[in-house]
Amino acid sequence: MQNTVSSAHHAGAHVAWKTGVIRRLGYACVCLSLEDATLRGTILRNASPERLRALIAVNLVTLRRVLQFNLEHGVRLFRISSEVIPFGSHPVNNVAWWREFRQPLRDIARLIRDSDARVSMHPGQYTVLSSTDPRIVAAARQDLIYHARFLESLEVDTRHKVVIHVGGAYGDKPAALRRWVDAVGDLPESVRTRIVLENDERLFGMDAVLAAASAAHVPVVMDVFHHRVYSGPTGDAHLGEMLRRAAGTWRPDRDGVPKIHYSSQAPGQRPGAHAEYVDADEFARSLALVPPELELDCMLEAKAKDRALFRLRESLGMCV
């Protein structure tokens, strides 16, 4: 289903729209419209196999409820929380969850297929392949193996991605990028084919991640908000070209439709802080800068999650 917007009038501004730019519009991890839809976790000392099995069972039920909600509301892009399997990459979790929970995982897989949905995962700030500490890199490797295994357990192909950042610069950005490229090259093929590199707002902008991704042969997901914070007032002048370059790193047969991330600045907070909702006028103006030949999947990273998505769709008459 494609975007059918022709124009929008919101907060006193009139912004012309193009159709067909956004194929899927999604949100991340938590569905605020559903009651009791937060994933359950535990602390390390309580992470017995029995406790972990109970939590995994509950979390998979919750994930299925969220995906069913998404299907019923036309949402076909969703980021699955890393916490769906508690301590998924930690040695304390020795449960073979991908075998023990094969049926509920297959039920979730069926929902994804039935709705033509696309899912992704995004490890946290401690999954750092650019580290100078081999122990941190080894832990990051295990974490990425876990994330790829979870997506494999859902029987989804490599269009369903694991998004990561470069990580720290450690006082030498070129060396950090080289370490990141080398670490990606050492990952198992099943993991490497799912990796997508994202720009950040402080250390590694679009030029750096495009170079690293090219060397590692992985796609780039452009975070428009991060690009604006990193680039400052000139960011939008290069937005279209950066989107074109990022989209060019995606191979349709293996990677699917190029993805972007989008959010707005939280008023009165530090640059880079995500707002509760997405500024609809700003979003429309951004899409007007997208090269006309591109079609994109867009993940909203607003704090209001699905509520932000529904407000944006309503404000702009979107149908994705």
Image: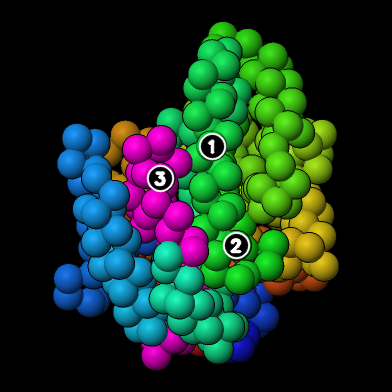
Between the residue at mark 2 and the residue at mark 1, the CA separation in whole angstroms equals 15 Å
Query: In the shown orientation, is residue 179 left or right of residue 139?
Result: right
- Would residue 140 be found to the left or right of residue 33 on screen? right
Give residue 191's position: percent from left, percent from top.
66, 47
Residue with the mark numbered 3: 94
| Cα distance in 3D space between marks 3 and 1 | 13 Å
| 58 vs 195: above or below | below
Between discs 2 and 3, the one toward the N terminus: 3
Which quadrant of the rendered structure holds the N terminus? bottom right
- Residue 233 placement, left or right of 277: right
Mark nearer the viewer, 3 or 1: 3
Assess disc 2: are there few (<14), some (14-19) or many (≥20) residues with their C-alpha within 10 Å of its C-alpha: some
Q: Which mark is residue 284?
A: none
Mark 3 element type? loop
Name the front one of labels 2 and 3.
Answer: 3
- The magenta stretch spans residue 208: no
What segment is highlighted magenta in the picture? 71-99
Q: Where residue 156 appears, x then y in whole percent?
A: 62, 70
Residue 30 location, x and y as percent? 31, 64
- Numbered disc 2: secondary structure: helix
Q: Residue at x 56, y 9 (%)?
A: 171
Q: Are marks 2 and 1 in contact (CB under 8 Å)?
A: no
Q: Can you say whether 2 is above or below 269 in the image?
A: below
